[in-house]
Image (cartoon, rainbow, N blue to C red):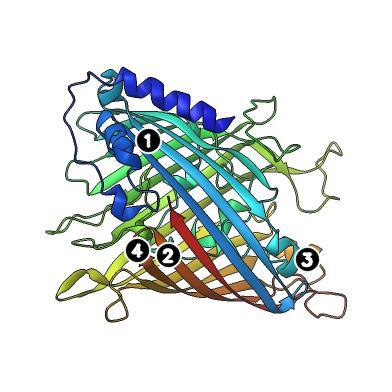
C-alpha cells in the first residue's frame, strides 16, 4: 500500500515539475554510492526535477555474553524510505521543501529480553514491530535561508540536542540523551515516533549563531496502539516545547555540513570529504504543559489527589575537532560532551552526562572508516533511590565501535558494550537485581 502511494506521488510531482526552469544541480553518482544504482537514469531525472530519494537497511546481531537478564543472541532490523522534494523546482514555491520518511522495525526486543538496561543498548530497537511515518512535513525559508518555518509530522531529535560526532555509536543515548528520552506519557517525539509540530529556526549572518524552537503534541502517537502511524490531539495531551541556542563559529575552511531535517545521508556515512570540522556549543530547555504524577504513588495534594509536577529539563552540549591530519583534512580526531537534567520528582534519572571520541581514518589505507569510544552516566534521583529501597545511584554504559566503510553503499560496524547496574535497582540484600552486562555485536548497513 505504501509503495503504491509513494510511486503515485513520484509520478505526479515529476510531471508537475517537468517544465520548471529552476536552476539545475548536478545529480549524485547513484551508481557509485548506492547498491541499486541510478535505475537506468530514472533517479537522476527525478533529482533534476527536485525529487531526492534514499533507501537504507540496517541489520544488527547482538549477543549478551554475561549479566543482565539472561545470556542470548538476537537479530534486529530497521528499514527506511526517504523522499525529499524541492517544491521550488516542482511547483515554483520559492525556498520550500517537503520531506517524507517512512520506516519499519523488525526482529527481537534485545534489551527487553536479554539485558534490561534503563537506557537501552541498540538505537534501532523499538517497543513494537511496526511500520510508520516518522517525518512528513513542509519547510519554508525566508530572508536568504536565515529564517525557516517547518510544520507537519516531526521528530525533535532530528535537530535538537544533536551532536554529529556521537552519531556513529549504536547505543541510544548518543542520539537523544536519556534525561529527555525518559520523559512524557508516550515519550517525546523522537525515534521511532514523530509528532504534529511547528518548528522555527533563525541563523545569524555568517552562520555563527542559531536559535530554534519547536512546539509539538505532548503525546506523540497512540499510547494504546504502538503499531502504525497515529496523530491524535486528545484533551489533556498538552504540548511539549523545546528551545535551543547554539554557537557555531565558522573557520576559514568550509565546515563539515551538519545533519538537517531530511538529510538523506547521515554524517558518519559521508565518504572522502575534502574537509571535516566540528565546532558547536549549545544550550537548550524543554517543558511539557501537562503535569505528571509523582514517583511516589502515595504522594497526594491537600485535597487527596495524586501529587503532580511539571516535567522539564535543561541541557548543554559541545563538540569540537581536536586534531586534523596534515595531509588529509577529512581525517582526524573529534569529541563531544553532553549534560542534561530532568525533574527528579517524576523521573528515574535526574541528570545524565556523556562524552566520547571518534577518529575518522584511524587506520592507514582505511580513510573512510570511523573508530569511536563513548561513555554515558545516568544518575538516579534521590526520590527514586528512596522509593526503590536504596537503588543504585547510577547506571554507566560504555561503547567501543569501529565503522568500516566496505563500499560507499555498504558499512560493517562491530561494537562492544559494557553496562553497569543495568536497571539501577537493588534487592532487599543490597545486591543489584541485574548484574553488570557485556554485549558484543555488529551492524550491517546498506544504502539502496
The quarter in which the N terminus is drawn is: top right
Mark 2 or mark 1: name the one nearer the start of the chain: 1
Question: What's the distance in space between the residues labelled 3 and 2, CA to CA?
Answer: 45 Å
Q: Residues within 10 Å of mark 2 (few under 14, many from 20)?
A: some
Query: Which residue is denoted by mark 4 in the rendering?
Result: 319
Query: Which residue is denoted by mark 1 in the rendering?
Result: 84
Query: Which residue is denoted by mark 2 in the rendering?
Result: 411
Question: What's the distance in space between the residues labelled 2 and 1, CA to CA?
Answer: 23 Å
Mark 2 or mark 4: name the one nearer the start of the chain: 4
- Closest to the camera, between mark 2 and mark 4, is 2
**Residue contact at pointers 3 and 1, CB within 8 angstroms:** no
Disc 2 is placed on an element classified as: strand
Q: Which labelled disc corresponds to residue 386? A: 3
Question: What's the distance in space between the residues labelled 2 and 4, CA to CA?
Answer: 24 Å
Disc 1 is placed on an element classified as: strand
Front residue of 135/19: it is 19
List x then y, in percent, for residue 98.
38, 29
Q: Residue at x 17, y 22 (%)?
A: 21
- Closest to the camera, between mark 3 and mark 2, is 2
List x then y, in percent, for residue 256.
25, 57
**Residue contact at pointers 3 and 4, CB within 8 angstroms:** no
* Residue that extends furthest to the left in the rendered view of this protein: 252
Q: Is residue 157 visible?
A: yes
Amino acid at each position: 500500500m505504501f509503495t503504491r502511494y509513494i510511486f503515485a506521488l513520484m509520478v505526479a510531482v515529476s510531471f508537475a515539475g517537468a517544465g520548471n526552469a529552476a536552476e539545475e544541480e548536478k545529480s549524485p553518482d547513484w551508481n557509485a554510492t548506492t547498491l541499486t544504482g541510478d535505475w537506468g537514469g530514472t533517479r537522476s531525472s527525478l533529482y533534476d526535477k527536485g525529487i531526492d530519494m534514499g533507501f537504507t537497511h540496517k541489520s544488527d546481531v547482538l549477543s549478551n555474553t554475561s549479566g543482565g537478564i539472561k545470556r542470548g543472541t538476537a537479530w534486529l532490523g530497521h528499514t527506511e524510505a526517504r523522499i525529499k522534494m524541492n517544491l521550488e523546482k516542482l511547483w515554483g514555491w520559492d525556498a520550500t521543501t517537503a520531506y517524507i520518511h517512512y520506516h519499519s522495525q523488525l526482529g527481537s526486543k534485545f534489551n527487553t529480553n536479554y539485558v534490561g538496561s534503563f537506557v537501552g543498548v541498540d538505537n534501532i530497537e523499538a517497543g513494537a514491530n511496526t511500520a510508520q511515518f516518522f517525518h512528513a512535513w513542509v519547510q519554508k525559508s525566508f530572508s536568504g535561508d536565515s529564517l525557516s518555518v517547518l510544520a507537519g509530522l516531526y521528530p525533535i531529535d532530528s535537530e535538537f540536542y544533536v551532536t554529529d560526532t556521537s552519531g556513529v555509536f549504536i547505543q541510544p543515548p548518543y542520539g537523544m540523551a536519556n534525561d529527555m528520552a525518559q520523559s512524557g506519557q508516550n515519550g517525546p517525539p523522537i525515534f521511532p515516533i514523530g509528532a504534529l509540530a511547528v518548528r522555527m529556526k533563525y541563523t545569524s549572518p555568517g552562520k555563527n549563531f542559531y536559535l530554534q524552537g519547536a512546539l509539538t503534541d505532548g503525546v506523540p502517537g497512540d499510547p494504546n496502539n504502538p503499531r502504525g502511524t497515529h496523530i491524535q490531539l486528545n484533551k489533556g495531551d498538552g504540548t511539549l516545547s523545546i528551545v535551543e541556542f547554539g554557537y557555531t563559529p565558522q573557520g576559514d575552511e568550509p565546515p563539515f555540513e551538519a545533519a538537517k531535517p531530511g538529510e538523506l545521508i547521515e554524517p558518519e556515512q559521508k565518504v572522502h570529504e575534502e574537509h571535516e570540522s566540528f565546532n558547536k556549543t549549545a544550550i537548550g530547555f524543554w517543558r511539557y504543559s501537562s503535569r505528571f504524577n509523582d514517583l511516589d504513588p502515595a504522594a497526594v495534594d491537600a485535597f487527596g489527589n495524586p501529587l503532580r509536577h511539571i516535567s522539564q529539563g535543561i541541557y548543554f552540549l559541545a563538540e569540537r575537532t581536536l586534531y586534523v591530519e596534515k595531509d588529509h583534512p577529512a581525517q582526524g580526531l573529534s569529541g563531544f560532551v553532553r549534560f542534561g537534567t530532568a525533574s527528579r520528582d517524576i523521573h528515574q534519572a535526574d541528570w545524565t552526562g556523556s562524552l566520547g571520541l571518534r577518529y575518522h581514518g584511524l587506520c592507514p589505507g582505511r580513510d573512510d572508516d570511523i573508530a569511536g569510544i563513548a561513555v554515558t552516566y545516568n544518575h538516579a534521583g534521590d526520590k527514586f533511590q528512596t522509593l526503590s529501597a536504596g537503588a543504585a545511584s547510577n547506571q554507566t554504559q560504555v561503547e567501543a565501535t569501529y565503522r568500516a566503510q566496505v563500499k560507499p553503499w555498504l558499512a560493517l560496524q562491530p561494537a562492544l558494550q559494557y553496562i553497569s547496574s543495568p536497571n539501577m535497582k537493588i534487592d532487599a540484600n543490597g545486591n543489584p537485581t541485574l548484574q553488570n552486562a557485556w554485549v558484543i555485536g555488529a551492524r550491517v548497513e546498506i544504502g539502496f
